[in-house]
Amino acid sequence: MNTLTRANLAEAIYSQVGLSRNESAALLESVLERISAALESGEAVKISAFGTFMVRQKGQRIGRNPKTGVEVPILPRKVLSFRPSQVLKARINGQAAPASDNAA
């Protein structure tokens, strides 16, 4: 199984868009920085036909150490979640993209 890296993405931008390698890397960093900043400020990031990244707040709860059985508090925290679009789900499952909801 291969992993897609920043270097792979920058190389794809370089080969498909025609920017220099340095410009491609800078563009990628700019996009990732903008996404990160939006998530830090609590905004959802929706990328059409891909999915939505959002930050959720989880409340405090009681957890249990599986080894000892001792209860420990789990502090409130923010977690990043991703909800894939129907188009992405279909592509992953090798199906045709679902019809648009606006087509009705």
Image (cartoon, rainbow, N blue to C red):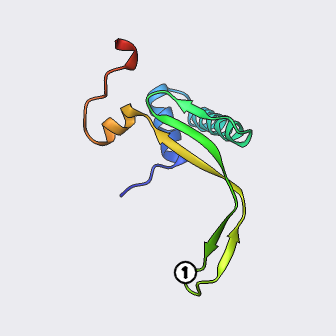
Residue ID at (60%, 80%): 65
Q: In which quadrant of the rendered image does the N terminus lie?
A: bottom left
Query: Which quadrant is the C terminus positioned in?
Result: top left
Rendered residue at 64%/46% (across/down) = 56
The local crowd at label 1, few if under 14, some if 14 to 19, many if 20 or more residues have their Cα within 10 Å, is few
Residue type marked 1? Pro
Task: Return the residue found at the far right.
Answer: 41
Q: Is residue 69 left or right of residue 92?
A: right
Q: Nearer the viewer, residue 64 or 98?
A: 64
Residue closer to the observer: 32 or 56: 56
Asked which quadrant contains residue 19, the reply is: top right
Please tell me in which quadrant of the rendered image residue 28 appears: top right
Outermost top residue: 104
| Mark 1 secondary-structure assignment | loop
Image position, residue 68 (x, y; %): 59, 87
How far from the left and from the top, in percent, is residue 71? 65, 78
| Picture residue at 38% right of the left edge, 33% below the top | 86
Query: Could you say where residue 9 lies in the image, as x and y percent from the top left?
Result: 50, 41
Left/right placement of residue 17 relative to residue 75 reads left
What residue did someone put label 1 on?
66
Q: Residue furthest bottom?
A: 68
Residue 2's place in the image compared with 27, above or below, is below
The reply, left or right, for residue 91 in relation to residue 75 is left
